[in-house]
Image (spheres, rainbow, N blue to C red):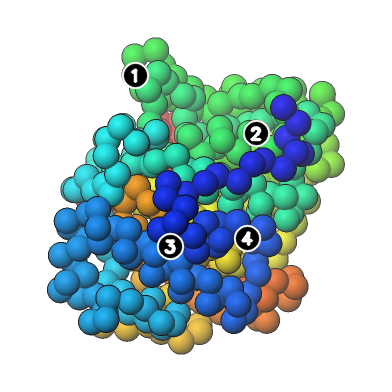
Amino acid sequence: MDPTAQSSQPRVPDPRALAQVQALGDLREPYAHGAAADALFVAAMNEILDWHRGRSPFYRRLLELQGPRSGRVDSIDDCLALPPIHANFFKTHEIRSVPPEQVVLHLTSSGTTGQKSQMFFDAWSIGAGEAMVERIFRHYGWIQAEPVNYLMVGYEPLRDWKVGTSWTDNALARYAPAHEVRYVLRATGTGGHEFDVFGTIRALQEFAEQGLPVRIFGFPAFVNATLERMQALKLPALALAPGSMTFFGGGWKGQADKAIPKADLQARIEQQLGIANALIRDGYGSVEHSVPYVECPRHRFHVPVWSRVAIRDVATLEPLPAGRPGFLHFLAPYFTAAPTQSVLMGDLAAWYPGSDCGCGAEAPWFDLLGRAGQGKNRSCAVAAAELLKGNAA
């Protein structure tokens, strides 16, 4: 299969009831912005509200208690007024709007221990999310026919492995043919994983010798730990081939005491691996809200046309103006498998107009500021970060 070929557009489960959802999903310019896009978004939101109202008793009752009196939304502001569901809700409840036989993928948000969000995907929900990723990768010129080497900075897959980050990292490998694939968190054979720092260093050295571009996907904490170990061993800097890139996700949760500023990590990667700063990118997403957010060359998360973002006051949950920190709130009227069209995250962020970036994208962008109190709530990054503890020496 030629990765540069345009993939076929997935189809909604009911073309008559979800015509506007289909039209929104069909948009190919990921950062289109303006009145026409807003109008289509609102129309799609009304369709997805009807969809879940008719298929999820839980969501029907939620709309009865907190939804719009008319049962419809007429503007983006109306969409923002819809009752959000906190992402933590999905850690204690299994909510579906499709029968079990229509579930084609089941992902969890955490590692081997801790609370897990259980998210179910029907064919449209997973296909639409994949199409979004493809269009963003195509937008940035990252879909190519030439082979690359992959360093997956995440879990080596096990049989029936359902962790969302592992699935995502491997799904990203479809956009350029793989010459070799190496994993940083190696399967132990007993159901667990270990951080293989020396194997990771060896992989990077071999990749540099081969001269093919390298794509590094996964948790930044392990890349930082690898580069620190290379420095401690006084190993020379590597020069990975032009076109090499990083695409991080998962953050530093669980390793906040070892986190370094993003700019410092970018400088370390540039110096020790030779990857250009503009190709050191972060991604953000979650199984509870599967729209992909990808940094632009200036390292801002612009909001794709298929979603909208608000920032909520941590005390009142009222929407905040640009530049004010609060809870991250996502809207996306495409997910048919579960009512996730309005999800409140535990992450803190601030939003800014597109013109404040300077990369050329007009869509607003947000800046991640951290996580608001972790307590017992764990993510796959938290579970993965615990593997660093045994490799600190």
Q: Which residue is mark 4?
A: 27
Circle 2 Cα neighbour tier, 10 Å, few/some/many (<14 / 14–19 / ≥20): some
Q: CA distance from mark 2 to mark 4?
A: 21 Å
Q: Position of residue 38 (x, y in %)?
A: 54, 76
Q: Nearer the viewer, mark 4 or mark 1?
A: 4
Q: Are marks 4 and 1 in contact (CB under 8 Å)?
A: no
In primary-sequence order, the first of circles 4 and 1 is 4
Q: Nearer the viewer, mark 2 or mark 4?
A: 4
If you read the primary sequence from the N terminus, does the residue marked by circle 3 or circle 2 appear first? 2
Q: Separation of disc 3 and disc 1 at Cα?
A: 37 Å
Inspect the image, locate mark 3, and give the three-letter code of the amino acid beneath it. Pro
Q: Which mark is residue 48?
A: none
Q: Earlier in the sequence, mark 3 or mark 1?
A: 1
* Residue depicted at x 60% and y 77%: 36
User: In this rendering, would 166 be left or right of 371?
Assistant: right
Please say if 41 is above or below 264.
Answer: below
Compared with 152, 16 (above or below) is below
Q: Amino acid at mark 1?
A: Gly
Upstream in the sequence, badge 2 or badge 4?
A: 4
Disc 3 secondary structure class? loop
Q: Secondary structure at mark 4?
A: loop
Q: Amino acid at mark 2?
A: Arg
Quarter occupied by residue 216: top right
Residue at the disc numbered 2:
174
